[in-house]
Amino acid sequence: MQNLHKTRVEVSARALGHNIKGFKSILGGAKMMAVVKSNAYGHGLAETAKIADKNGVAWFGVDNVDEGLALRKAGIKKPILVLGYTLNSRLRNCVDNSLSFMAYNQETVKALRSLKLKPLGVHPSKTAKAAYVHLKIETGTTRQGVAGKQLLDLAKSLLKVPGVVIEGASTHYANIEDTTDSSYAELQLKRYQENLDNLIRIGIDPPWKHTACSAAAILYPETYFNLARVGIAMYGLWPSKETQAVAKREKRLIDLEPVLTWKTVIAQIKSVKKNTPVSYGLTEKVSRDAKLAVLPIGYWDGYDRRGLSQVGQVLVRGHRCKVVGRICMNMCVIDVTEVPQARVEDEVVLLGKQGKDRISAEDLAAKIGTINYEVVTRINPTLPRIVV
């Protein structure tokens, strides 16, 4: 098939389906939420969601209303939860498009009241429009959420608003990924259960209860309740080295296959003499007579200038080739001296497998001083995502 894109992201439908199947096999009776926020962690929102939908996930998690609307436009009919903050001005969008959303402010209650929704009654009709709310319980992340009396007051206030349904209750773990010590996560789980029990005592028992992220879904079945939110690991990336280490220790290993491959092509090849400076700032000179290749990719595309200039590596015909000089906005240069057969428009892999070698998101993260999450989510969302 002819390549029409000089730079592209390829998404493996097979690998994504494999990872989803793996999680569904360990979740038991709990359902799986595919977290596709932030352009599906860089993998392509609609493209990824359609694959996940075909593989039987029960829910989708997004960051904002616009992502939820994009999924509806793409034909996703399953429940969608807006995990991030929903502006009061967008609550009507949620109601009209059956997007569930998090609540933790009394201001949200006031805004819902202003929508003047019709009471649902004991047996609401299928056409009745409702506001489906998930209570966010603060258990120790010190981020969005409420607990104790504030939580109970919020829940009571929501119940007084016509057309509001308290559909779920959730929390998020602060330190379940970056440590081999589960004590803080256990404390958060205890706090979640205590707050949930308090809600039940006043007659509020949300049908969907969810606390598990990827790391929790892999390591701690007690966090499942009846819904698990699986994000980074669904894409075949381990949440952290610590998560992988604990999974190995506890024999909770799950086979994860990376879903994403980031590719570009060689735009030009040129021969240069020893000591020739390369790219902006003349920050690097070649140490020998060399053959260089110009790639049509740069920091605009998400290929990190600060961390990968002069040290990054890419794959050309199965060989690792070093980035030479500074990465530019739309271009960079690599040394292909050791790949004499390299040609213009040869495929270049920036992230992923080529031949027997692989450049992982963890490899890039180590060079730029961050985590694999940031590497994939920073890939420019305007680049085409091609399902393969």
Image: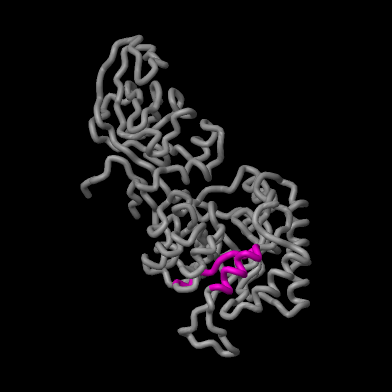
Residue 188 located left or right of residue 314:
right
- Using the image as rendered, state which of residue 166 and residue 275 is in the foreground: 166
Q: Residue furthest left?
A: 2
Instruction: Please identify the quarter of the rendering in which residue 310 is found.
Output: top left
Q: Image quadrant of residue 280?
A: top left
**Does any portion of residue 28 appear in the rendered image?**
no
The stretch drawn in magenta includes residue 246? no
Q: Can residue 101 be found in the magenta stretch?
A: yes
Q: Residue at image x 40%, y 23%?
A: 326
- Front residue of 246 and 38: 38
Q: Position of residue 342 (x, y in %)?
A: 27, 29
Q: Which residues are magenta?
A: 97-114
- Residue at image point 52% right, 31% down: 367
Q: Quadrant of the C terminus?
A: bottom left
Image coords of residue 215 (percent x, y): 62, 53
- Residue 282 picture location, percent across and down: 38, 15
Q: Image height check: is 195 above or below 48?
A: below
- The picture quadrant where one finds residue 68 is bottom left
Q: Nearer the viewer, residue 303 or 228?
A: 303
Residue 202 image point, x, y percent:
76, 78
